[in-house]
Amino acid sequence: MPAYVIAQIDITDRDGYQAYLAGFMPIFERHGGKLLATSRQALQVWEGEWSAPDAVIMQFPSKQAAEAWHDDPEYRELAKIRHATARTNLVLIDGV
């Protein structure tokens, strides 16, 4: 069953964040990840509150694949750049 990671992202250093993006896809794809949606325009919040101006929806073949990506030592090192250049919320949800 697929699993999805939804990220809320508030990039605080766009130039610095580019280093994160440069290394992201090879690690992500190694774990079977697919990008399903990214916010290229302003988000439309229909109800409630959304805590960040950007969002990403990612799909993995399974919850285990998503966890392996998130726990990958190479990704953990790369994520330090994200932590320094953006505020993020990540959630993992099961597909149906």
Image (tube, helix red, strand yellow):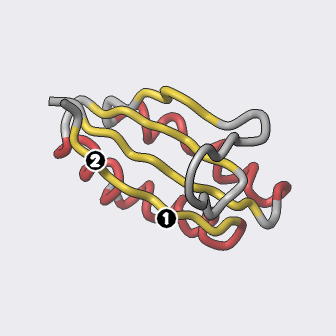
**Location of residue 74 with respect to 37 vertically, above or below:** below
In the rendered view, does 41 fall on the left or right side of 2? Answer: right
* Residue 42, image quadrant: top right
**Which of pointers 1 and 2 lies earlier in the amino acid sequence?**
1
Q: Is residue 39 above or below residue 67?
A: above
Instruction: Give the x, y percent position of residue 80.
Output: 56, 69
Q: Nearer the viewer, mark 1 or mark 2?
A: 2
Q: Is residue 44 left or right of residue 2?
A: right
Q: Which of 12 and 17 is in front in this view?
A: 12
| Position in image of residue 50 (x %, y %) | 60, 58
Residue for badge 1: 77
User: In which quadrant is the N terminus drawn?
Assistant: top left
The amino acid on which the numbered mark 2 sits, given as a three-letter code, is Ile
State the mark number for residue 93: 2
For label 1, the SS is helix
15 lies left or right of 90? right
Q: Which element type, helix, strand or loop, lies under badge 2? A: strand
Q: Distance between the residues labelled 1 and 2?
A: 24 Å
Q: Residue furthest bottom?
A: 84
Give x and y (percent) for residue 24. Answer: 55, 43
Q: Is residue 6 above or below residue 13?
A: above
Q: Which residue is drawn at 68% across and 37% down?
A: 39
Residue at (68%, 49%) from the top-left corner? 54
- Which of the pair 34/77 is nearer the observer? 34
Residue 15 percent across, percent down from the top left: 85, 55
Q: Mark 1 and mark 2 in contact? Answer it, CB < 8 Å.
A: no
Quadrant assignment, res 43: top right
Q: Residue at x 49, y 29 (%)?
A: 35
- Name the residue furthest front: 47
Q: In which quarter of the image is the C terminus?
A: top left
